[in-house]
Image (cartoon, rainbow, N blue to C red):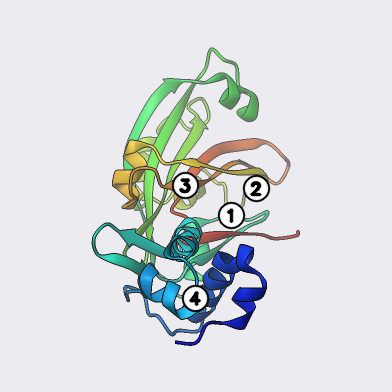
Amino acid sequence: MAVHSAEKKAPLTAWKRIADDLAAEIAGGSYEPGKGLPTALDLAARYGVHRHTARHALRHLKDQGLISVEQGRGSFVTGRRFPYRIGRSVSFRQNFNAAGIEATGRILSVHCITVPMSISEALDVPTSDSVWRVEALNSAGGKPISISIHYLATSRFADFPSVLRTHDTSISETFRHYGIKHYERLSTSLSARLATQEEVARLGLVYGDPVLTSEGIDSLPDGTPLQVVESAFSPARVHFVVERD
């Protein structure tokens, strides 16, 4: 194929141009989820660049969560990333249900633990108190999306585990049992880090992959802290959208 003239003019940005072109083609539907992309050698010939430049472009797309790279097989489109909206109201199920995607949650464990210092401060409870540590695996469209850990004061929710079981593992519905029909996000901190071994296994990641993380404090409308939620998301399946309230 003919060499793109723009690549000759700006060789230092060649990998970015290749990545942007492929990202646009993926967004436009030229490559369906699961479909293989051209190899680095094919891309090098198409753009008239070195194969290492093409590999740089593919690594960039992988880091963006748009493709997966399988040793010996090639690069494949991972699929569409869904917007995960973060504002005063944050609900995993509502976020995906609004997009017409069935979302589910599965409780992995429930433990009563001594309250960690950071959680004590966030929930405004004494360090001598205990909290429920509820770990859940959240899925949408049949794919694992995130692992979330919820911290709630046992003094306020003495029988939380048993009530949770009777409400289809929905924490929002469990809160309704306690007369809490509405709560809102008081604050959210966003970051990223390497996935833990458990997250790799639960979210279908590869060792060395990153996860997007959020740490939120939910409160009653009067500002009384209700729970702390720490979540790790697969970056290949969501992107955060911070809404102005």
Camera-side residue: 206 or 167?
A: 206
Q: Is 159 left, or right, of 181 in this rendering?
A: left
Camera-side residue: 163 or 44?
A: 44
Residue 35 location, quadrant: bottom left
Which residue shows up at 42% across the image and 21% down it? Answer: 113
Q: Amino acid at mark 1?
A: Val
Q: What residue sits right under mark 2 in the picture? A: 185
Q: Secondary structure at mark 4?
A: loop
Q: Residue 126: x percent and y percent?
A: 60, 16
Q: What residue sits right under mark 4 in the picture? A: 48
Q: Residues within 10 Å of mark 1 (few under 14, many from 20)?
A: some
Tell me which label, 2 or 3, sits earlier in the chain.
2
Which residue shows up at 58% across the image and 54% down it? Answer: 90
Q: Residue 118: x percent and y percent?
A: 59, 24
Q: Amino acid at mark 3?
A: Val
Q: Is 75 left, or right, of 66 in this rendering?
A: left
Q: Residue furthest bottom?
A: 2
Q: What residue sits right under mark 3 in the picture? A: 211
Q: What residue sits right under mark 1 in the picture? A: 90
Q: Secondary structure at mark 3?
A: strand
Which residue shows up at 53% across the image and 72% down it? Answer: 18
Give above or below for 109 relative to 210: above
